[in-house]
Image: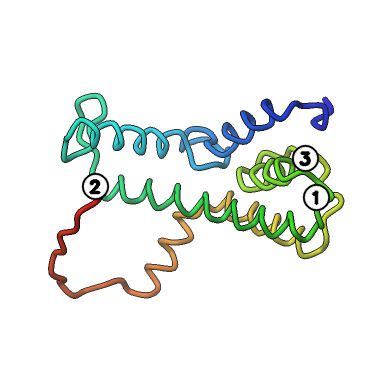
Amino acid sequence: MDLNALTDQSKLVSIILMFIGAAPAGTAGGVKVTTLAVLVMTVACVMRGEEDTIIRRKKIERQAVYRALTLFTMAILVVALSAFVIHFSLDGQFPALDVIFEEVSAFATVGLSVGVSGAASVGSRLVLILNMFLGRVGLLSLALAIAMRSGGRKEVLPTARIIIG
């Protein structure tokens, strides 16, 4: 199948599905379905005025919600920054949507290409390789490994009350 023949709408749907990925026990990359479910349910619970995230009459630990939010935010930032770097290193040879498609495919370890990696410079290819590694190892696993080495915070800090929204 020629991926260059896909419409922009089908590329966008593919990007979203690749970014989400599969279930956590699978070998597929992406942020995982459970991460997205926790975030969506957290938003729904906050809109209902609930303090906790509740899914199917089970309370989700706040630490899990924080991890899901951190993972999703880090993934968006990594993909956006990498796509930005690759797009501008190619001097506009490819549409931005094709570059994003290629970047998300690398991050989610899908293996699909619209030809961007073939025309990419060595630096852009290294960015794609790094994203394949990050997608396979997992951003959260890497961040936790780095945090464990630094020892983490031991002191008790005062609570700050801020107004959101």
- Tell me the residue at 15%/59% (across/down): 161
**Pointer 3 and pointer 1: residues touching (CB < 8 Å)?**
yes
Disc 2 marks a residue whose amino acid type is Arg
- Mark 1 highlights which residue? 117
Q: Residues within 10 Å of mark 1 (few under 14, many from 20)?
A: some
Q: Is residue 66 left or right of residue 50?
A: right
Please tell me in which quadrant of the rendered image residue 97 appears: top right
- Mark 2 highlights which residue? 62
Q: Earlier in the sequence, mark 1 or mark 2?
A: 2
- Tell me the residue at 80%/52% (across/down): 92
Distance of label 3 from label 1 (alpha carbons): 7 Å
Residue 134, position as x, y percentages in the image: 58, 55
Q: Which mark is residue 113?
A: 3
Residue 120, position as x, y percentages in the image: 82, 55
**Pointer 3 and pointer 2: residues touching (CB < 8 Å)?**
no
Give the secondary structure at mark 1.
helix
Give the secondary structure at mark 3.
loop
- Tell me the residue at 38%/33% (across/down): 37
Distance of label 3 from label 2 (alpha carbons): 38 Å
